[in-house]
Image (tube, rainbow, N blue to C red):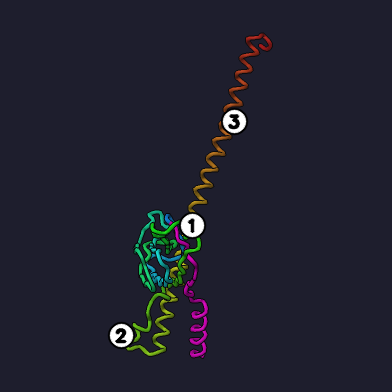
């Protein structure tokens, strides 16, 4: 029974484990190129492995930059003129998204009319968290068996799930605090409106009473 339960858990966590984010696209060339950015969610201290395979292209220069979506807009690294396969590794500094941005600069020697159909193909793979860890190297270094390696993978996946739940919990607490503050402000504004209307009503009554007395309409 325990063996069946273990196999069931292995299958379950293997199914819900995050997949590698892979994309292939054409990057057009320009003198002032607009960056092409691919964004993926990442938790604090998550390992991010970026593998970019840039196809050939004459008179073109492809630059890569990795940054995040936090208010500080941390730029983890920037590399110019990447060619062929390039593998980069960064660690996320905060909760949010990590973006991989590409720019394809056109050589000044090329006329703009000739650059309309010029582009370079980019094959991009992004591994985040447990997917970014090279468990084969760990297994060789620590002499782990196949089952021990799989358990190590599951340990990383479970840690990611726990981190995700902790992040959702903190975000829910922030939303709850925001709702409480908003409700308190709405209540204060409502009381202020009621008191202001009551004061205005009393002032109007006194003003009308004084006016009618001046006109000898009332005693």
| Front residue of 78 and 205 | 78
Q: Which mark is residue 141?
A: 2
What residue do we see at 41% from left, 79% from top?
Answer: 155
Q: Which mark is residue 113?
A: 1
Return the disc, 3 or 2, that comes first in the chain's sequence.
Answer: 2
Whether 114 is drawn above or below 11: the answer is above
In magenta, the rendered stretch is 1-30
| Front residue of 184 and 178 | 178
The mark closer to the camera, 3 or 2, is 2
What is the total number of numbered labels drawn onto the structure image? 3
What residue do we see at 50% from left, 83% from top?
Answer: 9
The mark closer to the camera, 1 or 3, is 1
Whether 33 is drawn above or below 4: the answer is above
Hey, which residue is sitting farthest left in the picture? 141
Residue 106 location, x and y as percent? 41, 60
Does the stretch in magenta take in 172?
Answer: no
Whether 195 is drawn above or below 93: the answer is above
Q: Secondary structure at mark 3?
A: helix
Residue 87, visible in the rendered structure? yes
- Location of residue 154 by image quarter: bottom left
Q: Secondary structure at mark 2?
A: helix
Return the disc, 1 or 3, that comes first in the chain's sequence.
Answer: 1
Q: Label 1 neighbourhood size at 10 Å, few (<14), some (14-19), many (20+)?
A: few
Hey, which residue is sitting farthest right in the picture? 217
Residue under label 3: 197
Does the stretch in magenta take in 28?
Answer: yes
Check whether the beta carbons of the residues at disc 1 and disc 3 lie within 8 A of each other.
no
């Amino acid at each position: 029974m325990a063996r069946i339960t273990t196999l069931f858990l292995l299958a379950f966590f293997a199914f819900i484990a995050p997949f590698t984010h892979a994309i292939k696209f054409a990057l057009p060339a320009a003198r002032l190129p607009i960056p092409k950015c691919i964004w993926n969610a990442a938790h604090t201290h998550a390992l991010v492995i970026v593998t970019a395979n840039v196809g050939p292209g004459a008179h073109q220069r492809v630059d890569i930059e990795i940054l995040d979506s936090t208010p500080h807009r941390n730029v983890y690294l920037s590399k110019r003129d990447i060619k062929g396969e390039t593998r980069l590794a960064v660690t996320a500094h905060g909760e949010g998204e990590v973006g991989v941005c590409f720019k394809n600069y056109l050589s000044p020697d090329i006329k703009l009319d000739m650059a309309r159909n010029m582009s370079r193909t980019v094959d991009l793979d992004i591994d985040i968290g447990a997917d970014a860890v090279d468990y084969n190297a760990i297994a060789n270094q620590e002499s782990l068996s196949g089952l021990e390696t799989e358990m190590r993978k599951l340990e990383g996946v479970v840690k990611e799930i726990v981190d995700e739940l902790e992040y959702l919990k903190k975000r829910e607490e922030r939303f709850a605090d925001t709702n409480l503050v908003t409700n308190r402000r709405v209540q204060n504004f409502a009381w202020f409106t009621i008191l202001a209307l009551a004061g205005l009503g009393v002032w109007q009554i006194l003003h009308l009473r004084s006016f009618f007395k001046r006109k000898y309409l009332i005693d």
